[in-house]
Image (cartoon, rainbow, N blue to C red):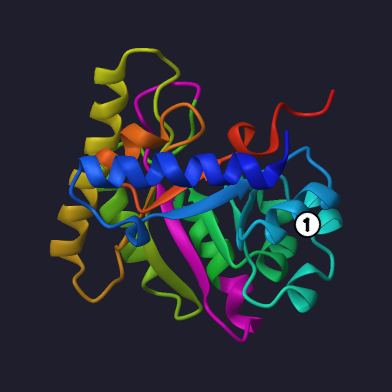
Amino acid sequence: MRVADAAARIRERMAAACERSGRKPEEVRLMGVSKFHSRERVEEAWNAGLTLFGENRVQEASEKFAGFAGSHPGAELHLIGSLQRNKAKAAVSLFDWVESLDRDELIVCLGKLSAVRDIPLSILFELNSGEASKSGYPDEDSLFRAAETALAFPSLRIRGLMTMAPFTDDTALIRRAFRSLAKARDRLQAGFPECDWSCLSMGMSGDYETAIEEGSTLVRIGTAIFGERPA
């Protein structure tokens, strides 16, 4: 699979989903999730016009993206996987965004470590879709407490919310998860109007069109761009 061809098809389907929902294509950003794929495949994606990349593991990202930002102006790297505290210092120095904030103690840890950054660390709070196997804050009340915790650290910049839809073919359940995130965002915006809640990171290779229809502003696409993970 040529990354450029795959990315072009994704963009076409994203534009169609935007049209169906009365949105503008520029309202939704495309992330290439490059986990388990090589630096060469990332370069292919960059040459195809992708500037936003997501990685699940700090160690893999640190090896794959070493020196990448300096030679690729405008590149943006997001951590989208679970973050353990012993990897937090490395994450703060490597990533532009951490999308997977799922507990208050991690917010405090990142808030302290990011004080050395020249630019605040952008963060998203992860809302659990309802599956016990998935991480994330369990409800809106916990998200409110997370926002209050993060606001104590000037080195953290709230940017919005993230979720992963349930692993199911039931589109109604998937839509319900995405609508829950949009609803939570609206309530947080009302409660913390001084913060930026504009990013709704939701939608992956199997459900990104539905996510766009439900208000996603950032879709995280791996397999549909890069192909199946190498064995």
Extreme-top residue of the structure: 169
- For the residue pair 46 and 4, the one nearer the viewer reads as 4
Number of callouts: 1
- For the residue pair 95 and 37, the one nearer the viewer reads as 37
Quarter location, residue 230: top right
Q: Does the magenta stretch include residue 136?
A: no
Instruction: Give coordinates of residue 208: x percent, y percent.
Output: 41, 36
Instruction: Give coordinates of residue 46: x percent, y percent.
Output: 69, 60
- Which quarter of the rendered picture does the C terminus lie within? top right
Extreme-bottom residue of the structure: 118
Q: Residue sitting at 43 percent across and 34 percent down?
A: 164
Residue occupied by mark 1: 43
- Which amino acid does the dot numbered 1 rest on? Glu
Instruction: Give coordinates of residue 145: x percent, y percent.
Output: 30, 55
Q: Residue sitting at 79 percent across and 40 percent down?
A: 37
Q: In this view, does 58 lie to the left or right of 66?
A: left
214 in relation to 231, above or below? below
92 in relation to 226, above or below? below
- For the residue pair 154 and 104, the one nearer the viewer reads as 154
Residue 81 makes an appearance in the image: no
- Which quarter of the rendered picture does the N terminus lie within? top right
Residue 76 makes an appearance in the image: yes
Give the residues drawn in magenta, as a range.
112-133
Mark 1 surroundings: few (<14), some (14-19) or many (≥20) residues within 10 A = some
